[in-house]
Image (cartoon, helix red, strand yellow):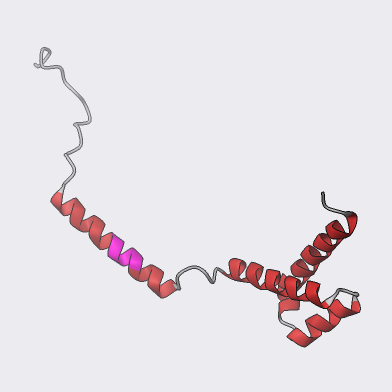
Amino acid sequence: MIGRRTKRRHRRNAGAAKFLAHPRVAEASLEKRIAFLKSQDIPEEDIETALSQASLAAADEAGLDEEPPKARRKKKKKMMKKKKAAAELNPRPPPPPSFLSCIFCQK
């Protein structure tokens, strides 16, 4: 069972991480961000935790774990070439006629 202090600490860490991940705050120097959190009576250990959580959240939002655009374009181009080659090897059957006639009712 988690005690009240632990719950408060988790909430405080989450709030600090959210604060640090905000784009306007992220533009400020690291010293200013740490000084602000210290002025809010947040312990050094919690500040470090919040900084690591905020950096992970910022990386997720920025998509840093994704491929760079040039690599994506290259990959897409390669995939399109494969699709085109496969289409040439296995052409689609012609579409059915717009009207179907019965072989018994042909005039």
Looking at the image, residue 25 sits to the left or right of residue 60; the answer is right
Residue at (52, 69) in percent of width and height: 65
Instruction: Please say if 20 is above or below 99.
Output: below
Q: Can you say which quadrant of the picture contains the C terminus?
A: top left
Pick whichever, 85 or 41, lies toward us. 41
Instruction: Please say if 55 is above or below 29.
Output: above
Q: Is residue 76 magenta?
A: yes
Give x and y (percent) for residue 26.
Answer: 71, 78
**Count of labels shown?**
0
Give x and y (percent) for residue 24.
Answer: 74, 76
In this view, the residue farthest toward the front is: 1
The quadrant in which residue 54 appears is: bottom right
Q: Does the magenta stretch include residue 94?
A: no
Pick whichever, 22 or 95, lies toward us. 22
Give x and y (percent) for residue 74.
Answer: 34, 70
- Which residues make up the magenta segment? 75-79
Looking at the image, residue 103 sits to the left or right of residue 83; the answer is left
Pick whichever, 102 or 26, lies toward us. 26
Residue at (75, 68) in percent of width and height: 17
The quadrant in which residue 10 appears is: bottom right
The quadrant in which residue 44 appears is: bottom right
- The kind of secondary structure the magenta stretch mainly shows is helix
Looking at the image, residue 68 sits to the left or right of residue 77; the answer is right
Residue at (12, 13) in percent of width and height: 105
Pick whichever, 47 or 19, lies toward us. 47
Residue at (82, 60) in percent of width and height: 11
In this view, the residue farthest toward the left is: 107
